[in-house]
Amino acid sequence: MMNKYFNKYIKLTSAISLCLGIASLSVSYAAERTNQTHLDPVSAAQIELGRYLFYDADLSKDGSMACASCHKQRHAFAEDNKTHPGFNGDHGIYNVPSLANVGMLKTYSWTNQHITDLAKHALVPITGTVPVEMGMHGQEKVIEQRIASNACYQRLFAKAYPDLKAPKITMTTITQAIARFEGSIKSFDSIWDKSQKTKQPLPSEMQEGEKLFFGKGHCASCHLPPLFTDQKFYRIYDQITQDIRTPPLRNVELTAPYLHDGRAATIEEAIYAHDSKNTSVPVMDKQEITAITIFLKSLTDYTFINNPAYAMPKEDCIK
């Protein structure tokens, strides 16, 4: 069903090339998930270290914010506010994006197309100034000292970087470990994924929306499976002053509000925001938009949001 819509509306050269392309993508993502369960000890140690750091508020100025303060697992590692204020109350500029499958993306922010290293992107909330988030600009040595003074972290870093000469605890290794954890966050176990794997149709209530998504609605021209983003930058309505990256739609049911500034409270509002003058999305009636919204719920991965491997460690790194 999906291939038919793609062949007709996305204008790929042939049904055969489409099948080969989607198959190769499916194989690559399956391989990613398989590799995640067969990691070498050092890689596993780096991911576990990164998990502790991701949930550690000592990376912020006053110990009040961690990466997880904005990226909450129950919201697919996004959050339910338009933007998140910094530790000092500075208003956020952008809606918090989901971290699902973030390690498979090419760039890591709504607008800056030049941040292509996930470890470097980890510095943005920690040390950034526009806006101030975690408030540690110019305080990199303070972070290193805080972490290095912790006996538990000393052991975790030694295990994660066994071949690295001292000092092992630096901003480089800290952000690398956070990136390793974030890159391990995978979401490919939704109803839609199961349907693709088994070649069985979606539940009947989702089928009309699927047809519209891959057909008349032209949604898939930008929200391309399997990540449901083409990772390109657009201006979908006139009020936008800079190009905005196409957000992935996996787990979109859990990541409200929507759009880069959180202005859309619902999925329906986000769809309506796509100006037909600026995009290939046609004007659709309320019934059609409701159907697409119902289909998008097939992308929710409940295994992902309840996976203990991504959750806060049971104990702080204090021992």
Image (tube, rainbow, N blue to C red):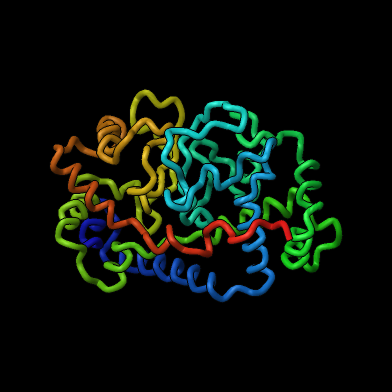
Q: Is residue 154 above or below residue 253?
A: below
Which residue sits at x=64%, y=34%?
Answer: 128
Q: Nearer the viewer, residue 277 or 86?
A: 86
Which image quarter is the C terminus in?
bottom right
Residue 218 drawn at (x, y percent)? 25, 46
Residue 16 drawn at (x, y percent)? 29, 68
Q: Residue 244 sits in which quadrant?
A: top left
Which residue reaches farthest right? 166
Which residue sits at x=18%, y=48%?
Answer: 291
Residue 183 in the figure: left or right of residue 247: right
Q: Can residue 214 be seen in this snapshot?
A: no
Which residue sits at x=25%, y=34%?
Answer: 272
Q: Nearer the viewer, residue 283 or 88?
A: 88
Which image quarter is the N terminus in?
bottom left
Q: Residue 20 sits in which quadrant?
A: bottom left
Q: Is residue 253 above or below residue 311?
A: above
- Numbered-mark total: 0
Residue 32 drawn at (x, y percent)? 50, 68
Q: Can residue 98 be seen in this snapshot?
A: yes
Residue 52 in the figure: left or right of residue 29: right
Residue 294 in the figure: left or right of residue 101: left
Residue 286 drawn at (x, y percent)? 15, 38
Which residue sits at x=43%, y=61%?
Answer: 306
Q: Nearer the viewer, residue 217 or 91?
A: 91
